[in-house]
Image (tube, helix red, strand yellow):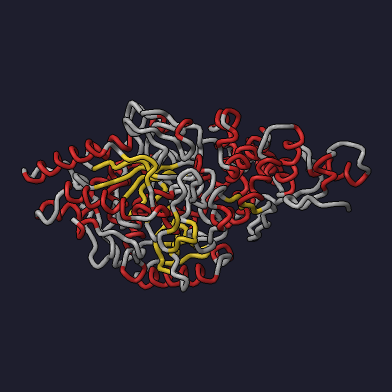
Amino acid sequence: MGKMCPVHNFPIAACMGVGGDGGGDLTTVASSKFRHWPDLQTKSVTLGDETYRVKATLAPAASGWTLKILAWIIGGPGVLREHLRRFLLNDNGIVRLRDLAIQIIDTHAAPLLTLPMMRLKKGHMEAHQKMAKEAKPIKGRTGLPYRSVLDYHEAYLSGESTPTRVLEALLTAMKELPQEFQVFREVEDIALLRKQAQESDKRFAELRPLSVFDGVPVAFKDMVWMKGLNTTKGTTPSWGSGASTKDDFTVAKLREAGALSIGLTLMTEFGTTPLGYSVHGKGPMNPYSKSHYSGGSSSGSAVGVALGLFPVALGFDGGGSIRIPSSATGLIGLKTTFGRVPFDDDYCMSVIGAGPMAATAVDAALFYEVIGKPSEEHFYQQHYGSTPLPPAHSYGFQDVENLSDLKLGVFQEWIDDCAPAVKAASRKVLAFLESKGAKIVQITIPNLEVFALAHALNISVDFSLGHERQYFGAHETLEPATRVQLALGASVSAVEFQSTNWIRGYASKCLAKVFEEEGLSAIFTPTMACQPPPMPRSALKTGESNTTLIMKMMQYIFLANLCGNPGITIPAGLSQEGLPIGVHAMAPHWNEHVCLRLANALDVPKFRSVPPDFKDLLKMS
């Protein structure tokens, strides 16, 4: 067979002589593995097949010098490198996208769907409007280890603490934390923060706070504009926005509520990996174990909340980037319905949603109700049409003792395909929900494996298109894993990308059908199929490229991104290794209130914990 490439494990002759005179075997490999448009000689997938199967992702895992070599081999421009990228894509069965899409088209199984926004029927809209009017005020829970937004509010009203004292405690805590737990990429001007805290002090002294968020510290992922700060999306500052001249919609809403907007949190470069480590930011690591990943890409927001620096933060989620780090750090993280939360950037991404990463279910619900207010001028409202978007509400949030009106769908083979510790934790949570009256319904979902591939390729193309200028203009300043990811996304053909949108339409139809026919409130799974993974020491300077691990981390969360549904991760306790485990609930479009109610029902001491370096700002102040 000849010498093998140590990185890719295929013939070196194939790397160096694609299409050359290497003999019959090479010609066969070149024709089948390196082509942009491999033949559909035999059916690779059957439309509607409900058999649960997972094809292992064939890709090298690399960090350190190995990753640098990998990035040089396939992460740059050039014809030979393009052929190598096609080998990797084809070797992982990308042909299945075209195969399934053709079957969808031939059978008229579903329409093409590029943006997964679902318009409610009149009756459903009226039901949401009624629920929004009847929703009760959100009340706090007792016995939890974290301080909620309501705890801050009550401390300020009683005079136990003040926004200024809390801010000073926060600044002290930030200095005390080691480098591994530094969560901010850029902090707001301290003098301005102190001025805002003093203004909040005055409002409380006069008993006229703007809202429950008045004087409460919050933070935002480094993807939104904060006036005066440089939004970089996790890359080098030179490729950032420069000092922003305006606040993002979400930031403006929290400022109007009186919150102390502390700054922009670290994230993985462009959000291209859910591992969570930023080479540029040298962290953050998991607060439960410095040797483990924190999850990403909203890693700074997650670690900051877990450590008690702020009770809630904004994250963005295109492939689990709210839910994965929230699960890995023991938090509640809500990815909202596509179109629910307006924001001012990244319109090109059809899989993204903003949402809260919160210490408690109360914080998630309160934050959601603030950022979920629609904007008439925003693209989301224009795309939805002349009818207003459904109202954001938390109806039923307090109804946690009797869950007999809830039906949870479980695809048993799917949820059992995970690490033993994750499976055990998930079963305990299901038993707890059943003890409260929730009904468990066995379901199946067809073609899951191809749905996962469609999401992975769709978001990869979004990344590559959105960051093409940086890829060509600042290639050497990008992290090696980022270069690999952007190059692979750019190698997806137009036919394959369009196939993902046909598959999205079919997947959305399948989900809507199972929700309706079974009368489901939500579909229940673990959040990740594994515990928070350990980080190789060789990744400290380079990061890590590990597609097999990443697909395992995203095994349960991708459907909510592909189809635009809301999904929430909820803490399910710690493993024997002391690492957080989360469970996940995905609801029908616009039904965030169901997700939040489940989170509140499970927000009990038996499933909650705080990391060793947790900071209680109210106690410190």
Q: Tell me: 392 left or right of 320.
A: left
Regarding residue 112, the answer to whether it shows in the image is yes
| Depth check, front residue: 151 or 406 | 151
Q: Is residue 608 above or below residue 470?
A: below
Q: What quarter of the picture does the C terminus occupy?
A: bottom left
| Depth check, front residue: 388 or 460 | 460
Query: Picture quarter containing residue 601?
Result: bottom left
Q: Tell me: 615 left or right of 434.
A: left
User: What residue is shown at x 90% (from left), y 47% (from top)?
Assistant: 25
Q: How many labels does the image show?
A: 0
Rendering coords of residue 439 (x, y %): 42, 67
Rendering coords of residue 115 (x, y %): 51, 36
Q: Is residue 120 above or below residue 153?
A: above
User: What residue is shown at x 66% (from left), y 32% (from top)?
Assistant: 494
Q: Is residue 493 above or below residue 570?
A: above
Query: Picture quarter containing residue 144?
Result: bottom left
Rendering coords of residue 600 (x, y %): 31, 60
Regarding residue 447, the answer to whether it shows in the image is no
Q: Tell me: 14 left or right of 69.
A: right
| Depth check, front residue: 132 or 486 | 486
Rendering coords of residue 488 (x, y %): 65, 40
| Outermost residue to the left | 206
Q: Is residue 230 above or below residue 268?
A: above
User: What residue is shown at x 55% (from left), y 31% (from top)?
Assistant: 470
Q: Tell me: 330 left or right of 42.
A: left
